[in-house]
Image (cartoon, rainbow, N blue to C red):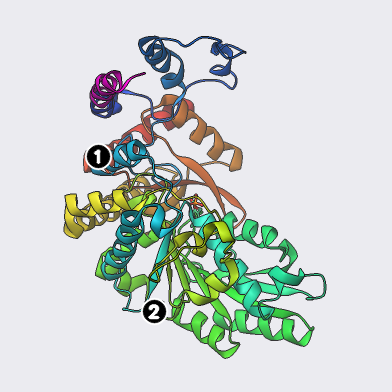
Amino acid sequence: MNWDEFSDWGKTISQWGADYHKSLRERPVRAQTAPGDIAAQLPAAPPETGEAMDAIMADFEAIVMPGMTHWQHPRFFAYFPANAAPPSILAEHLVNTVAAQCMLWQTSPAATEVEGVMVDWLRQAMGLPEGFTGVIQDSASSATLSAVLTMRERATGYSGNRDGLSDKGHLRIYCSDQVHSSIDRACWVAGIGQANLVKIPGTGPRHGMDAAALNTAIKADIAAGHTPAGIIAITGGTGVGGSDVLEPVLEVAKAHNLYTHLDAAWAGSAMICPEFRDAFWQGVNGFDSIVFNPHKWLGAQFDCSVQFLRDAMPQLDTLKIEPEYLKTTGAAVTNYSEWTIPLGRRFRALKLWFLIRSYGLEGLRSRIRNHVAWAEEVCEALRALDGFEIVTEPILSLFSFCCPGDDAAQQRLVDALNDDGRIYVTQGMFAGRKVIRFQVGQFDTTRADVMMAYDVIKDVWEKSS
Ligand code: PLP
């Protein structure tokens, strides 16, 4: 392909993109294909000679698109959103076109400097004090793994990387039972082990960990000769939005000199609204590390996960490695690859710059406020539906409900709704029961889309029961 053809196809694909987004409401949200359907349509072996772009594009439409679940569909109520606002898609086009590998300041100074400023814009937007710096990672899983490795190194006098963990006894990390599985996986991968991740049951209206129980667990571990290494708190757990009350957790951390990480992967976006900070983030300034994903609710195209650090040095002391071929000369600069596990880096900050400039913080806040209000409204409608039960009340824009019947009945309704295609929801477990999760957060959703979900649930339930 030459660059003139690239230009023509770029225009065609942009037009295709606009048409696609405008037609989303007419498409089933979840892909309606069976396992193997797509692979069966692809040649088993690669072509020996090049093919024309129009043939490739035609196959993309005919073979690939039927197998796509439409995450940008306004009636996507499953999992958490992965919003891609149009300006962030355009920024990604530019990043993909310039195609720089931004591992060091000198491998693209603009990528590093825009990243530093975007992290600081978001710090201000979220009400964090000056002094917090940060880095953009691919995912919250990577940021949490970085924080867990930092806990491990800090607790071992920065000797784990060098000497291994064989004589380090049991390092212990604490969290509530509402955390995402990325916390478990970080502890596996860091060599801490699942058995040393201590989960304190969530209690109270937001299912947060009880600080007294946390303190008791830490003291018992110390008495047993274990080494507490850190605490991971959560704002907005994946299952039902479980959120810790932060100040008491931080007091326990301080009493035991423990490193603290806060996973706000989903709910963090809502913290650009001061009223949600008052409700969920009292004391947040005390955390050593905080992660949130602008690629979830805020509107920055996947992937884009921001990790704020109160003091970057412990993480740098854990992860920084500087072989000769990565050394740079001249004035001191920030090389963000020293802050993270992967060396190679995409220019993720550009989409934040486009997004925040296009909508302004007020434009982004008003979306989030609407989502929270509409979630409460549809929750009330479902509460009034005969035999239906709200199992967990809305936490921001996420709640869970049950239809009449046992766990199998919940799964049947989830599957029937997703086969119907007008909306997309997923199931979860809460207090040993299967529940149907419902979150409102898609960038283009409207009140009508959200309230339509009530009609669809009622309709599908009546037809299938
Ligand atoms: N933490 C929470 C609360 C989540 O809901 C998720 C994903 O949904 C993650 C962490 C992991 O996010 P990522 O896919 O960016 O690793």
Residue 209 shows in the view:
no
Magenta range is 1-16
Task: In this rendered view, identify the residue nearer to me: 401 or 14.
Answer: 14
What is the x, y in percent for residue 100?
A: 39, 44
> Callout 1, which amino acid?
Pro
Q: Residue at x 33, y 74 (%)?
A: 128
- The residue at the point 62 percent across, 80 percent down is 213
At which x and y percent is residue 28?
38, 25
**Is residue 14 rendered to the left or right of residue 100?**
left
Is residue 262 in sight in this rendering?
Answer: yes
Res. 285 mark? 2
Q: Does 232 appear above or below 402? A: below
Question: x%, y% of residue 272?
Answer: 28, 64
Relative placement, left or right, of 151 versus 172 is: left
Task: Say if disc 2 is inside 8 Å of ligand 1.
Answer: no
**Residue linked to disc 1:** 86
| Quadrant holding the N terminus | top left
Which quadrant would residue 97 be assigned to in this image? top left
Near-viewer residue (192 or 340): 340
C-beta proximity under 8 Å, tags 2 and 1 = no
Front-most of 261 and 24?
Answer: 261
Mark nearer the N terminus (2 vs 1):
1
